[in-house]
Image (cartoon, coloured by chain):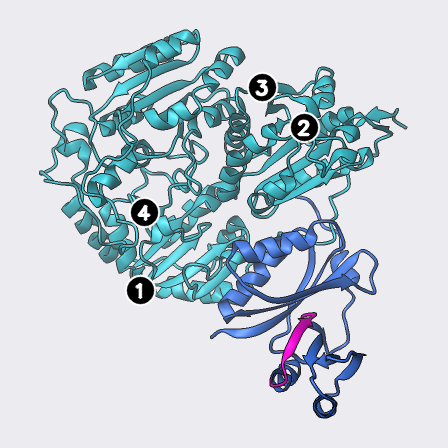
Amino acid sequence: MSAPRTGAQILWEALAREGVDVVFGYPGGAIMPAYDALLDSSIRHVLVRHEQGAAHMADGYARVSGKVGVAIATSGPGATNLVTGIATAMLDSVPLVCITGQVTSRLIGTDAFQETDITGVTLPITKHNYLVTKVDDIAKTIREAFYVARSGRPGPVLVDITKDAQQATTTPVWSSAPVRMRGYRPEHKAELDDLARATELIDRAKRPVILAGHGIVKAEASGELRAFVEKTGIPVASTLLGLGGFPATHPLSLGMMGMHGEAWVNHAIQEADLLIALGMRFDDRVTGKLDTYAVNAKKIHCELDPAEINKNVRADVALVGDVKDTLEALIPLVTRRDRAQWLQRIDEYKGDSAVRDIQTMPHDGRLFAAHVMHDLWRITQGKALVVTDVGQHQMWEAQYYKHDHPRKLVTSGGLGTMGFALPAAIGAKLASPDDEVWVIAGDGGFQMTACELSTIAQEGVKLHVAIINNGYLGMVRQWQQFFYDGRYSATPLKSPDFVKLAEAHGLTGIRVTKRDEIEGAVARARRADGTCVIDFRVEQEDSVYPMVPAGAALNEMIRRPNPIVETAEDD
Amino acid sequence: MMTLRTYIMHVEDLPGVLNRVTSLFRRRGYNIESLTVGRTENPGVSRMTIVMEADDDAARRIEANLYKLVNVLKVEDTTRRPCVTRELALIKVRTSNQSQRAHVMQLAEVFRARVIDVAPEALIFEITGTRDKIEGLAGVLAEYGIVEMVRTGAVAMLRSAPEQVNEIQEEPRATSAA
């Protein structure tokens, strides 16, 4: 029989029982009882500089570790500051538990100081949320929250706990039995006759393409995917969040599909007679105009969430279930086929268009972002854990940094949250301390959460930060160039001296303006005691190619201007 | 093809559940024709009847999305199943003279509507039935001048033996905890 405990103490013990070793948060009035009890807990707390950072750190931690990330904030503004981070996690199916303090229960609904209806605010951007007003409900709710966050299609769960519930005492009842809920049945298993129908389509297909998504990474299904690919000989295109789920250097890896996918990938998809979608949801950024999307292809959709089936693209066969289980079931059923003709056809597209910027860019000392990505990939031997922000650099990274392993690329895909990278990288580093972690961010996105440099300094976290500084909000500038007659509205960007900014935080700062300085800068960054910020001054009006304009068909790409014949120089 | 669909839902009787359900319809861009909610024979379980227009694909996705709400216990699309549906309406009709009043009451009789309030200038009818029946009466009464009308929205029940929500929902299950 355990002794009576306060709700705040129960909260930390409940977190410890879920295996939590680190939380990211910021104190305030309504969460003070919990912060007081934190001093007696063994859980590490990372003090952020803005609660949005806490949510992104928990997110980065979750994406890398595969565990549930935890963010904590006070009521009102503390809670609302989490919102962007929660929405980011929701769109990318990242398991988070966000704990917020709430005003004392008798004050709820009175517009009390720092009162916000945060369960109302986050209702559409959480998988589920709870308002806890009674101390006896804390332990059970935390357990349920973790179960909901990580089970089925993962997602963020918010638990709002009133101050009086944190202060009240009770004798906690701990259970180790499986969580039981009246509703909520997240598990599904593909039907046998659907597996048979899928097998028939796969065996009959002459021009099949696998579309590998985030689900491969989340389900830890990389091994099964590889076995499936090597048995069937079917080439793999990846979504942005699927990168690393299948080795980029594998001969059957095509690369990224979609708006900034390479031409041969999108052409292969458009010409395919079968698409095998694995843990992806046919986002508009990967399909282009829907009624022109892979019109001759049958579609097999392997997906855990039944609500995704037939949402954007009609599935001929839907295999609803965990993609790892589905692949395990399919592997013994499918037969090996000779795909030489189809692969040769795709190779012809590569031959036609394999003129990547890397090879076509003038080697005249100027610094192109693509150079930076390519050289970082080469110098780190493709082994770094890369956390990207949102914009042009994110696409260049996806094109030129070849990821061979899952959970080595962390990026905000669905919501496209600028400011994500720096805080997410802190979480990523804490989840995987042995990894060399690189933040790649634009000058715009970096400044949205640059305050977290202080967190980095205080926590002694070692990151390598590459700012791809082109003096513009580059992706918007690119759209303005292509679609708004080059009228640069609110995209030229003046930034602080990032080297001095790093130094002001007690960190190292380096500026790179020429390609031949990259290697030395990376070496210095690696040698630095703490985090090093490298300000890469890249070509200002460079654009990401190819590009499928929004609403165009996938094969209607804006191609790289003036492609010249490739040279072997950079291979 | 867009058809009018009726869903029966069993949900946990907790604060905010109605909000979660309606928020889902709003967020996904589906327009609710009518929604009713109330207690059931099972303590802790509320029942909703939702009527809305959707094609078959959308209907399946709505069902799948509803099941993603943690407090939802069971969803049944009754559209192509044997089912009884009823709605209640109160209709206030202007009656300027004695003979008109008699005439209106006679008409209402045909629809099995009851008079529940009589005032010098107006009558209130209560009618229970399907949507078609209520709209039929409203159409007829419109000629005399409907002052106001209130409708409850449909409630529905499948004709087959009702399944016990609790029996279906309470089997144990393992967590995916590492």
Q: Colour of chain A?
A: cyan
Q: Secondary structure at mark 4?
A: loop
Q: Secondary structure at mark 1?
A: loop
Circle 4 Cα neighbour tier, 10 Å, few/some/many (<14 / 14–19 / ≥20): many
Give the chain letter at badge 1. A
Task: State the extent of the magenta-drawn residues as a range.
Answer: B143-153
Residue carrying label 1: A295
Label 3 vs 2, first from the N-terminus: 3
Find residue A438 and report its horizontal and vertical position in percent: 39, 23
- Using residue A171 as the reference point, say whether residue B139 is left or right of it: left
Taking the image as drawn, is residue A431 in sight? Answer: yes
Label 3: which secondary element = strand
**Residue closest to the eye, A384 or A428:** A428
Q: Which residue is depicted at the point 27% across and 13% down?
A: A511
Could you say which chain is coloured blue in the image?
A: B
In the image, which is nearer the foreground, mark 1 or mark 3? 3
Which image quarter is the N terminus of chain A in?
top right
Percent of width and height locating residue A452 = 48, 19
> Which sits earlier in the primary sequence, circle 1 or circle 2?
2
Marker disc for residue A113:
2
Mark 2 element type: loop
- Tags 1 and 3 on a common chain: yes
- Measure the alpha-carbon separation of dots 3 and 2: 26 Å
Say which of marks 3 and 4 sits in front: 3
Q: CA distance from mark 3 to mark 4?
A: 37 Å
Name above or below for residue B178 compared with residue B163. above
